[in-house]
Image (cartoon, grey):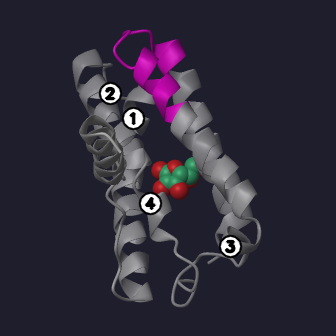
């Protein structure tokens, strides 16, 4: 093999290895449970704090709402790597998280997409658009909880 071919092959392999996303690593199932519950708690906090604006009880500070939704967007992708098989115990996750992995994935994507849409209108100052996009995010939270979270 020519030197350049060897170099290119090694380069390709090295690049592929380097481009692997950093996988969430959990030493114990309970570490995964703690991680996802923490992320979902933060999501609930950053979602819920916009409620009074959406209800019209607090003035719509577009810059503040937009900054908050940016945080929510970052948070929205975090919980899903923390549902490794075998981590149902001591959590509210239903068996369907694993038995219906495709449906669970779809529910995540619906939520993430709704958050992206919310981020697109959050700085607009248009309360009606904010309310509608906020409602869609809430509906996606609820839909996933109805199917994949045990009732308390
Ligand atoms: C929240 C929160 C949820 C969702 C859900 C929306 O703020 O903690 O779980 O909204 O209630 O229906």
How far is mark 4 from mark 2, CA to CA?
Answer: 30 Å
Q: Earlier in the sequence, mark 3 or mark 1?
A: 1
Q: Is 56 drawn above or below residue 9 in the view shown?
A: above
Residue 23 is situated, as x and y percent measured from the top left of the image, at 36, 63
Mark on residue 58?
Answer: 2
Seen at 39% across and 20% down, the residue is 122
- Label 4's element? helix
Mark 1–mark 2 CB contact (< 8 Å): yes
Residue 126 is situated, as x and y percent measured from the top left of the image, at 44, 9
Residue 19 is situated, as x and y percent measured from the top left of the image, at 33, 46
The answer to whether residue 119 is left or right of residue 105 is left
Is disc 3's CB within 8 Å of ligand 1?
no
- Label 2's element? loop
Please name the residue that numbered disc 1 is placed on. 52
Mark 3–mark 4 CB contact (< 8 Å): no
Please name the residue that numbered disc 4 is placed on. 79
Mark 3–mark 1 CB contact (< 8 Å): no
> Nearer the observer, disc 4 or disc 2?
4
Q: Earlier in the sequence, mark 2 or mark 3?
A: 2
Spot the residue most to the front: 1
Q: Which residues are magenta?
A: 114-130
How far is mark 3 from mark 1, CA to CA?
Answer: 36 Å
Q: Main secondary structure of the magenta part?
A: helix
> Nearer the observer, disc 1 or disc 4?
4
Mark 1–mark 4 CB contact (< 8 Å): no
Counting labels gives 4
């Amino acid at each position: 093999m020519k030197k350049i071919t060897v170099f290119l092959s090694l380069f390709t392999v090295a690049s592929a290895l380097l481009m692997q996303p950093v996988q969430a690593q959990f030493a114990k199932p309970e570490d995964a449970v703690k991680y996802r519950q923490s992320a979902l708690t933060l999501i609930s906090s950053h979602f819920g704090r916009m409620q009074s604006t959406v209800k019209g009880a607090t003035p719509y500070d577009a810059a503040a709402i937009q900054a908050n939704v940016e945080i929510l967007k970052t948070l929205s992708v975090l919980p899903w790597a923390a549902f490794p098989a075998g981590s149902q115990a001591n959590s509210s996750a239903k068996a369907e998280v694993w038995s219906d992995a495709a449906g669970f994935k779809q529910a995540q994507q619906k939520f993430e997409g709704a958050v992206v849409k919310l981020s697109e209108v959050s700085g607009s100052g248009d309360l009606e658009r904010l309310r509608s996009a906020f409602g869609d995010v809430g509906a996606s939270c609820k839909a996933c909880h109805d199917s994949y979270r045990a009732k308390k």
